Image: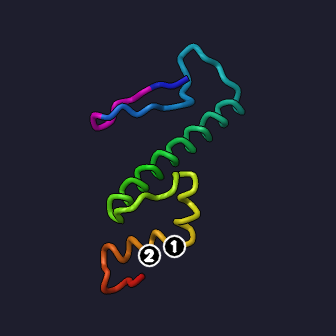
Amino acid sequence: MSVSEEVDGLVRPHYGSVLDDERLTAEEMDERRRQNVAYEYLCHLEEAKRWMEACLGEELPPTTELEEGLRNGVYLAKLGNFFSPKVVSL
């Protein structure tokens, strides 16, 4: 079940939202909260991916695989080179 909210002209869904007549246990509420946090994280990661693709001019791996590329520093080094090629060489 999802509920939407408009922020800055964009409709942002809130997954795991509770309706007025719905009763949940504490465990169910915790699970919905975890799902909402995971959803928001993936949305922000996708936004970052699109921004990096625009800067680097190359297609990056799917969002679920992008984390490893960020952890090992390859994409961060490429971004450093994009912003300051004299300081960060590849």
Query: Residue at position x 36%, y 65% from top?
Result: 56
Residue at which label 1 appears: 73
Q: Position of residue 21 (x, y in %)?
A: 57, 13
Q: Position of residue 48 (x, y in %)?
A: 41, 55
Q: Quadrant of residue 90?
A: bottom left
**Residue occupying the far top of the picture:** 21
- Horizontal arrangement in the rendering, residue 29 relative to residue 74 (left or right): right
Amino acid at dot 1: Gly
Question: Does residue 88 lie above or below 41 as drawn?
Answer: below
Which residue occupies the foreground of this view, 75 or 10?
75
Question: Does residue 79 lie above or below 87 as drawn?
Answer: above
- Horizontal arrangement in the rendering, residue 70 relative to residue 7 (left or right): right
Q: Residues within 10 Å of mark 2 (few under 14, many from 20)?
A: some
Residue at which label 2 appears: 77
Magenta region, residue range: 4-9
Q: Tell me the number on the disc at residue 22.
A: none
Which residue occupies the foreground of this view, 64 or 42?
64
